[in-house]
Amino acid sequence: MAATAGASFHLQSFFVNRLRLSFRAQHRVRFPSGKAGNVLRGALGAIAPEWIAARARTGPSGMRNRPRPFVLRAAHLDGKSIAAGEPFHFEVNLFDRRYSVAAAIADAFAEIARQGLGVGRGQAELISSACDRLVLDLRPKMIPIEKVLIRFVTPTELKDENSLATRPGFGILFARVRDRIGALSTFYGDGPPEIDFKGIGERASRVRMTRCDVREVEIHRRSSRTGQVHPIGGFVGEAEYEGALAEFVPFLEAARFTGVGRQTVWGKGQIEVGVVSPA
């Protein structure tokens, strides 16, 4: 396979166990607008805090806390009210390859549903769970790719040095994608990636953002433990990029499952990726 000049990717595959949990509401189940993932994350933290407070030895780039081994995909439930007897579902993307982890997550959410969840804590029952293993190829694409469209589906916050970026410049976006996939691979996959960080960062910085149509979304949550109110918003919308993109697209496609940026566990930073064909 012909690789992009100067590229050094020894991390060739990324694994995801995609868990789909289906429920039937026994009483009305309501999810607040913009907060379905946060509600589920909070419920999981209450019943199984070990899944939320994942501590670890020092990792990549001096990380002291390992990334959580999952992200929730529940944005389609935002603001929804599910009547008694109606089905609903959400997904959990898992980066720990062990099927026992998927079974433990399914059992935890079955208990959460039994106790009640959402506004008013409506009860539900788990009626099925299915886990599909995906193996994503991270090697550069074999054909030239010169333009991509990124859609930021849920509120996204990208750290740029000591502040948050107001626009998703490609260099910043790819750096956060690269670091997240690298950290997940280090703790749950085949070990730390051997990547020419400096070289790939320089090439990413040369990719141009040709269109940016994003807007800020303000959402807040109240901590049940401290009572404090915290912002959980970010920007949504889409941006187009042009340049030599063949080596970056596989990582962007993997980021569809991992999310990018801050607070990805409850579904922030969900993206969609489209390769734009020449006119």
Image: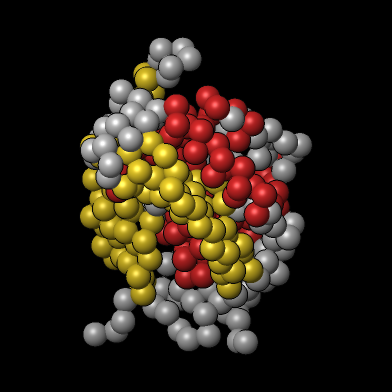
* Residue 5 x, y percent position in the rendering: 60, 79
**Vertically, is 271 above or below 23?**
below
As drawn, which residue projects farthest toward the top? 226
Q: Relative to residue 116, is residue 203 drawn left or right? A: right
- Between 278 and 225, the one lying in front of the other is 225
Q: Give 227 or 209, whichever is nearer the viewer.
A: 227
- Image quarter of residue 61: top right
Q: How many marks?
A: 0
- Which residue: 37% across, 48% down? 89
Using residue 60 as the reference point, say whether residue 219 is left or right of it.
Answer: left
For image coordinates 62% across by 87% down, the residue present is 1
Please determine whether, in this image, residue 234 is positioned above or below residue 198.
above
x and y, in percent, of residue 171 in the image: 47, 57
Q: Is residue 61 visible?
A: yes
Asked if one can make out residue 35 in the rendered structure from this viewpoint, the answer is: no
Question: Measured along the vertical axis of the image, is residue 146 above or below residue 175?
Answer: below
Q: Position of residue 183 (x, y in %)?
A: 64, 50
Residue at 67%, 66% in the rendered image: 11
Q: Residue at x 41, y 12 (%)?
A: 227
Quadrant of the snapshot with the C terminus = bottom left
Q: Quadrant of residue 206?
A: bottom left
| Residue 7 place in picture, x, y as percent | 62, 73
Which color scheme did the rendering employ for the protein?
secondary structure
The residue nearer to you, when weighing 27 against 143, is 27
